[in-house]
Image: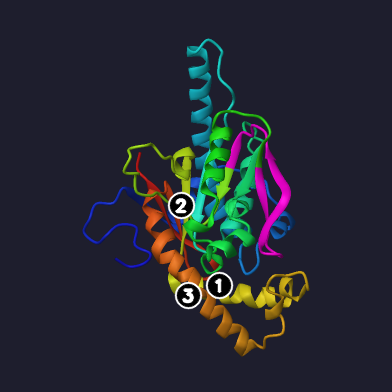
Amino acid sequence: MQDTDVAAPGEPSPYRRFSRQQWAALRADTPLALTAQELEEIRGLAVEIDLVEVEAIYLPLSRLLNLHVAAMQRLFRARRQFLGGNGSKVPFIIGMAGSVAVGKSTTARLLRLLLSRWPDHPRVDLVPTDGFLLPNVELERRGLMGRKGFPESYDLPRLLRFLADVRAGRRHVKAPVYDHLTYDVVPDAFIEIDQPDILIIEGLNVLQTGRPPRDGEAIPFVSDFFDFALYLDAPEDLLRRWYVERFFMLRRTAFADPRSYFHRYAALNDVQAEAVATQIWETINLVNLRENIRPTRFRADLVLRKGPHHRVQEVFLRNI
């Protein structure tokens, strides 16, 4: 199976495949409630995206998600009536997974903005799972700094408690904050989630499962809390190129800040920078992609397959 195959050759697929043109036609009359300036403000480093891409790919996606949210809201109202008016409001939770450098953060911010423009669910929150990484001091103690971003580097119990509280309809639930400049969790800093209409959870391994325990005790997975799951896909050669391009941009920007964890890379010349970025990609990010991230792709409800310049070429939507 190739690294971008969604189903093995000759096997029936649970997904319906859409070409870029077919998917774009599903926008119907969804308005473009977004300006070029707003798009520029949310665009990540080395992620090429314009209003043409938004119209072709992300407006149809926001329309689909709006339909799912509306259906969930109808079900919630019916269940509350069944229960005699009891029941706390819970958000529609969207999970988003994919490799380093595939553009998850930009896509999550874009979807947050587009979904908030629909009148029935204006409150949309976003929580990156970076905040649930173990602090660097703990990673160092466990010998895991070289595997940061791998499943074992996260405080999974804390993430599961957070999602359980949100799903229980609790108010003012706190998620920890991560600082990419210092490359560490920020002590005593939080994102407060207070019963939004939609909550987007974005991270490398959010679709991952594990083996059931031998003692038979139930263990929930992060994805058990999702109402809809997205996976951003791209060939390995493009992911590597995007990672190296982002490294070069960071070398000129964030790495130049003396507070940056990677400040030592700011003085590298182009040849050295490419060698370091390639080594990090091949020994850490590519290993994590192959071992932990890509195997979860089949658990997604929708797969966006990117080509050159971060343009989505195909969309795979799981059959209901």
| Horizontal arrangement in the rendering, residue 234 relative to residue 93 (left or right) | left
Examine the rendered structure and indicate whether residue 248 appears above or below residue 303. below
State which tag comes first along the sequence, 3 or 1: 1
Discs 3/1, front: 3
The earlier-in-sequence mark between 2 and 1 is 2
Depth check, front residue: 129 or 37: 129
The residue beneath circle 1 is 242
Q: Position of residue 16 (x, y in %)?
A: 35, 49
Q: Secondary structure at mark 1?
A: helix
Q: Secondary structure at mark 2?
A: helix
Pair 3/2: label in front: 3
Residue drawn at x 40%, y 55% is 297
- Within 10 Å of disc 3 (Cα), the crowding (few <14, some 14-19, many 20+) is few
Amino acid type, residue under disc 1 in the picture: Trp
Dot 2 amino acid type: Trp
Which corner quadrant holds the C terminus? top left
Q: Residue furthest front?
A: 141
Figure quadrant of residue 243: bottom right
Q: Furthest-left residue in view?
A: 10
Which amino acid, by three-letter code, is at mark 3?
Thr
Residues drawn in magenta:
175-199
Q: Alpha-carbon distance for marks 3 and 1?
A: 16 Å
Main SS of the magenta part reads strand
Q: CA distance from mark 3 to mark 2?
A: 36 Å
Query: In the rendering, which numbered label is found on residue 23?
Result: 2
Which residue is label 3 attached to?
283
